[in-house]
Amino acid sequence: MDQTVFLNILMATVEKHGCRIVELDIENHVINLDGPDDKVNACAQAIAKLVGE
C-alpha cells in the first residue's frame, strides 16, 4: 500500500474512533495516541486490524 494512502486511511480510522495521533514514526512503526482510554483502546484495535496484526 502506498504510504500516502496508508496515512489517509490511518487518519480516517483514528478520527472515526475519537482519538488523535500525538506522534507518528513510520520507520519504526510507532503511533502514539491521545484521548480517553476507551477511545484510545478502540483506535489501537482498529489500527491493529488495519495493519494486519
Image (cartoon, helix red, strand yellow):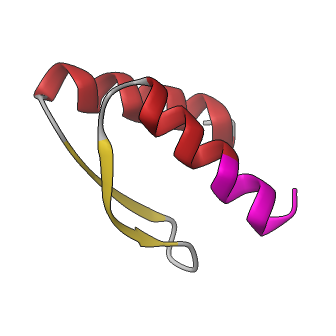
On the rendered structure, is 5 left or right of 15? right
Residue 15 among magenta residues: no
Q: Residue at x 65, y 35 (%)?
A: 50
Displayed quadrant of residue 4: bottom right
Furthest toward the bottom, the residue is: 27
Furthest toward the left, the residue is: 36
Displayed quadrant of residue 40: top left
Residue 18 in percent (x, y) is at 32, 28
Q: Nearer the viewer, residue 16 or 32?
A: 16
Q: Quadrant of the N terminus?
A: bottom right
Residue 30 in percent (x, y) is at 42, 65
Displayed quadrant of residue 39: top left
Our reading of the magenta stretch's main secondary structure is helix
Q: Quadrant of the C terminus?
A: top right
Q: Which residues fall within the magenta stretch? A: 1-8
Residue 2's place in the image compared with 28, above or below, is: above
Residue 9 in percent (x, y) is at 67, 43
Residue 5's place in the image compared with 2, above or below, is: above
Q: Residue at x 47, y 25 (%)?
A: 16
